Amino acid sequence: MTTQLEPDICEDVCIHEQLVEKVKKELPRAEQMMELSNLFKALGDFTRIRILEALLSSELCVCDLVSVLDMNQSAVSHQLRVLRSSKIVKFRKEGKNVYYSLDDNHISQLINQGLNHVLESR
């Protein structure tokens, strides 16, 4: 009896050598895939996604983020450090205030594409 959980198994052992070689040549280097994996790990946190969604709308200082997210400053600052170290957000100082924004357009595209995927899946 076949169930829907079994489609990832080939009936016969078969290897399409030319296709396998083509795909192997096209794969990014292991270091690049590790960096990509780390990017998605950094994005894979509810609080960090909330921060990024807020920053999609506007550059915000830490105090603004605290207010928008209704969180304490140390928790927001901790998550911002993770996002900064992953090159997902950038900051600038203006006097005593620190303003955060998305690092580049790729980040906004990732967030928007992810949200579009979630909304389509409903």
Image: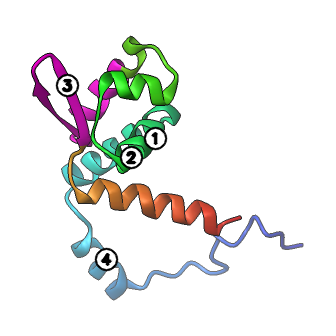
Q: Distance between the residues labelled 3 and 1?
A: 20 Å
User: Which quadrant holds residue 2?
Assistant: bottom right
Tell me which residue sits at (11%, 26%) in the image: 94
- Image label count: 4
Mark identifier at residue 98: 3
Pointers 1 and 4 in contact (C-beta within 8 Å): no
Which span is picked out in magenta?
Answer: 77-101
- Which label lies toward us, 2 or 3? 3
Please say whether residue 62 is one of the residues in the magenta stretch. Answer: no
Q: Position of residue 100 (x, y in %)?
A: 24, 35
Residue 60 locus on image (x, y percent): 30, 35
Local crowd size for mark 3, using a 10 Å CA cut-off: few (<14), some (14–19), many (≥20): few
| Residue under numbered circle 1 | 49
N-term-proximal mark, 4 vs 2 = 4
Give me the C-alpha separation between circle 2 and circle 3.
Answer: 25 Å
Q: In this view, does 89 lie above or below 17?
A: above
- Which residue in the protein does label 4 denote? 23
Alpha carbon separation for disc pair 1 and 4: 32 Å
